[in-house]
């Protein structure tokens, strides 16, 4: 997989969820916090997204074709108008693979939207995700981002059709939507910096790809610099400026991220996980893992396997 795909896959902790909402004004939904990230897509009409009072942001009007990605699942309000008072918390989509429809009757104008949530590990977010703006707004209107518009149309049809096979079709479509949203944001960046610039930089992106391809290799800064086509010193400066940490610090971070994913998703013995992440002994790996996660590898694996409370 490419770097963006691996980063998202490394943070996934469960299935996505989505709800198709058909609302007629007046209406307001206070969406409770979720353990992950979320999105809203306006299919018809308009609405307002109102951030929580302590966030300091102003209400933002959304129109048909707008896609909003919320980096963290903070409480917020969706409403036909910022002045419409929300009543309590709307349960909303909260991961776990749930999909559904919501109808709100009223005498006013109609709004149709898709709201979704992704289960992402926010305890140790990858710096790529942490570096995103709190809210990304993408305008997927005619003539812009055709792949994103097509994904939105297909997802909306599946969530409203009630046809056989939808439960198997919708989850991967929501995953696809996430990548199209992030790709559109990266493409729209006028003066990219941070991770947007790192992924767009041919040399640094090659070095990142090398780290992700072989996290267990004993990389040196000089070797990674050769992958990037830069001298050791020039590479170290450029990598640190764009990625936000030195090359070997990021290598260690990605090794631990990879180890966490292997412990969650496989039954490989600790010795195999240690070898795949560049540690010569199980003891050295366990020590490094506990320093990073605050728990031993075995305890982490048991905790990840434990079913979530309903």
Image (cartoon, rainbow, N blue to C red):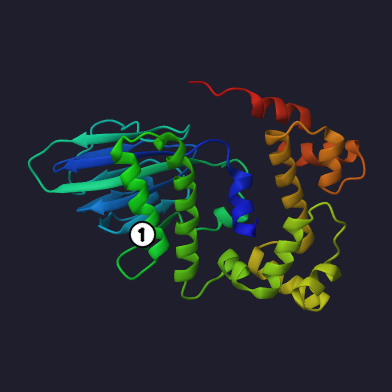
Horizontal side, residue 187 vs residue 299: left or right: left
* Up/down of 245 relative to 227, above or below: above
Res. 52 in view: no
Residue 58 picture location, percent across and down: 30, 56
- How many marks do you count on the picture? 1
Q: Which residue is mark 1?
A: 149
Residue 301 picture location, percent across and down: 72, 29
Residue 122 picture location, percent across and down: 56, 42
> Which residue lies at the image location 77% right of the left edge and 78% below the top edge?
229
Horizontal side, residue 233 vs residue 16: left or right: right
Residue 132 picture location, percent across and down: 51, 58
- At numbered mark 1, what does the secondary structure look like: helix, strand or loop? helix
* Up/down of 162 relative to 7, above or below: above
Horizontal side, residue 166 vs residue 224: left or right: left
> Which residue lies at the image location 45% right of the left edge and 64% below the top edge?
184
Which corner quadrant holds the N terminus?
bottom right
Please tell me which residue lies in front, 28 or 203.
Answer: 203
| Quarter location, residue 137 | bottom left
> Which residue lies at the image location 27% right of the left edge and 38% below the top edge?
29
């Amino acid at each position: 997989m490419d770097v963006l795909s691996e980063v998202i896959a490394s943070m996934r902790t469960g299935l996505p969820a989505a709800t198709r909402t058909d609302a007629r004004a007046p209406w307001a939904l206070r969406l409770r916090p979720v353990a992950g990230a979320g999105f809203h897509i306006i299919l018809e009409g308009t609405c307002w997204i109102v951030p929580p009072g302590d966030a300091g942001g102003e209400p933002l009007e959304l129109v048909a074709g707008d896609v909003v990605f919320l980096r963290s699942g903070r409480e917020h309000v969706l409403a036909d108008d910022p002045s419409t008072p929300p009543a309590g918390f709307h349960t909303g989509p909260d991961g776990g693979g749930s999909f559904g429809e919501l109808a709100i009757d009223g005498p006013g104008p109609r709004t149709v939207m898709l709201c979704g949530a992704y289960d992402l590990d926010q305890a140790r977010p990858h710096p790529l995700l942490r570096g995103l703006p709190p809210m990304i707004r993408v305008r997927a209107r005619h003539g812009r981002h055709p792949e994103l518009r097509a994904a939105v149309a297909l997802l909306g049809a599946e969530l409203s059709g009630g046809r056989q096979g939808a439960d198997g079709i919708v989850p991967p479509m929501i995953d696809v939507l996430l990548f199209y949203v992030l790709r559109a944001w990266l493409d729209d960046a006028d003066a990219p910096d941070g991770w947007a610039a790192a992924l767009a930089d041919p040399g640094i992106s090659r070095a990142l790809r090398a780290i992700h391809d072989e996290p267990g290799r004993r990389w040196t800064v000089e070797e990674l610099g050769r992958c990037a086509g830069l001298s050791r010193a020039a590479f170290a400066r450029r990598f640190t400026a764009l990625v936000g940490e030195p090359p070997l610090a990021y290598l260690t971070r990605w090794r631990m991220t990879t180890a966490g994913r292997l412990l969650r998703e496989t039954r490989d013995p600790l010795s195999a996980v240690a070898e795949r992440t560049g540690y010569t002994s199980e003891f050295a790996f366990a020590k490094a893992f506990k320093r990073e996660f605050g728990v031993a590898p075995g305890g982490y694996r048991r905790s990840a396997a434990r079913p979530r409370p309903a």
